[in-house]
Amino acid sequence: MNCWIRGGNKIITVGIDVGSITTKAVLMNGAAWQGVLRPTGYSPRQAGREVFGELLDKAGLARAEVDYIIATGYGRISLDFTDKAMTEITCHARGAHHLVPGADMVIDIGGQDSKVIFTDKKGNVTDFSMNDKCAAGTGRFLQVMAAAMGVDVSELAGLSRNEEPVQISNMCTVFAESEVISLLAEGVERGRIIAGIHRSVAKRVAAMAERIGKGELIAFTGGVAKNEGVKEYLAKERGQGNSCCS
């Protein structure tokens, strides 16, 4: 049975985010929503089309029943079936405004870049800073570090919980990987190394944020927001206590 109700002032909208690592799609009909995600792989266009098709199947809808489609993410321009493409900076700001009322700063750490976004009370972008020149402080950086220690990136937070962080001197991915391998060879426990990596990522992102201001309530977005270790150190670096959200 199709649980979607069309009528009144409700319109059916779809948002597709083609990221460097994962592609996500959400279909909304009023307050009801459904979503899917999958690895982006080598073809952003194909990934976008596949999540859209899977989403329609999941919702029991035809393409003609969708009123409006928005594309965002680094692969947004590769999708030729959407009504509009918007930068992820704008989308993060609007999404944070909707989900975290009162948030005036968004810290987004994705697969290939990290961003700090300031917003006004309506969710409009007022300023932002972005690191897209190297992998330092991104999801890709954490993936490389995880691989160097023989664990999955999803295990990092659990392994580092309550561990005393070791000092990680390098943020360049290549040099940091060598440093991690050397620490392992010295017998330093993995948990301490991972905690040090989390602290280093948080320090780098916090420094980027500090250059443009200090938010009262921070929304933490992107794939790395799932990592409780990075979230904890980021809150400490920003002096936010528990007001750093994900």
Image: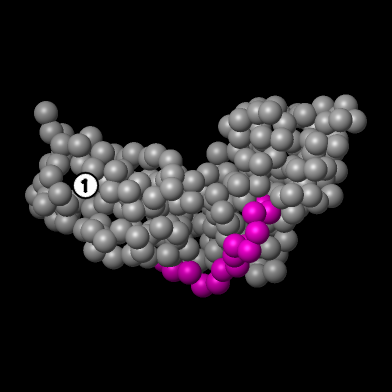
Q: Position of residue 83 (x, y in %)?
A: 24, 63
Q: Residue at x 88, y 27 (%)?
A: 187
| Quarter of the N terminus within the rendering | top left
Q: Position of residue 84 (x, y in %)?
A: 29, 65
Residue 99 visible to the viewer: no
Left or right, residue 36 beside residue 66? right
Left or right, residue 51 beside residue 147? left
Question: Colour mode?
Answer: one colour
Left or right, residue 126 beside residue 191? left
Relative vertical location of residue 39 with respect to residue 219 in this rendering, above or below:
above
Q: Residue furthest front?
A: 42
> To which quarter of the image does residue 40 belong?
top left
Q: Residues within 10 Å of mark 1 (few under 14, many from 20)?
A: some
Q: Position of residue 14 (x, y in %)?
A: 26, 51
Residues shaded magenta: 121-137
Foreground: 96 or 73?
Answer: 73
Q: Residue at x 38, y 40 (%)?
A: 37
Query: Would you name the residue on which mark 1 appears?
Result: 29
Disc 1 marks which amino acid?
Asn
Left or right, residue 7 beside residue 109? left
Q: Secondary structure at mark 1?
A: strand
Q: Residue furthest bottom?
A: 126
> To which quarter of the image does residue 242 belong?
top right
Q: Is residue 129 magenta?
A: yes
